[in-house]
Amino acid sequence: MNGWVELEFTVLADGSTGNIVVTNSSPRRVFDSSAVNAVKQWRYKPVMRGGKAVDQRAAVRIRFTEE
């Protein structure tokens, strides 16, 4: 089965992710929890403003395909 999930999340000042929200998916709800769990594990270099790390909202589409 193939599909995709679009999510919005916040890259927090410590580089972790939070406030993860599924905004769209196809097929509906099939891959949502897998996508959220993946994004929870991601780490980023935080956005810097004025020499200080700040929270930044981001969005991504994760595609799921059969191998």
Image (cartoon, rainbow, N blue to C red):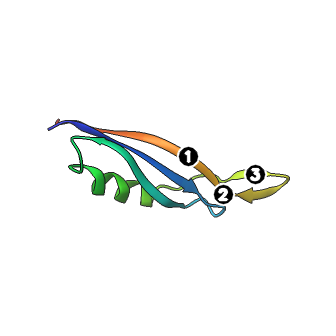
Residue 63 locus on image (x, y percent): 31, 37
* Image quarter (top left, top right, bottom left or bottom right) of the C terminus: top left
Q: Position of residue 45 (x, y in %)?
A: 63, 52
The image quadrant where one finds the N terminus is top left
Horizontal and vertical percent position of residue 48: 75, 51
Report the mark closest to the observer, 1 or 3. Answer: 1
Q: Which residue is identified by label 1?
A: 58
Neighbours of disc 3 within 10 Å: few (<14), some (14-19), many (20+):
few
The image position of residue 27, as x and y in percent, is 21, 41
Mark 3, secondary structure of its residue: strand
Q: Quadrant of residue 41?
A: bottom left
Within the image, what quadrant is residue 40 found in? bottom left
* Secondary structure found at label 1: strand
Under tag 2, what secondary structure? loop
Please give the residue where the numbered disc 2 appears in the rendered image.
55
For residue 48, the mark is: 3
Q: Callout 1 environment at 10 Å: few (<14), some (14 to 19), or many (20+)?
A: few
Q: Is residue 54 left or right of residue 24?
A: right
Q: Amino acid at mark 1?
A: Ala
How far apart are the two marked residues, 1 and 3, measured between alpha carbons?
15 Å
Q: Is residue 39 above or below residue 59?
A: below
User: In this rendering, is residue 30 above or below 4?
Assistant: below
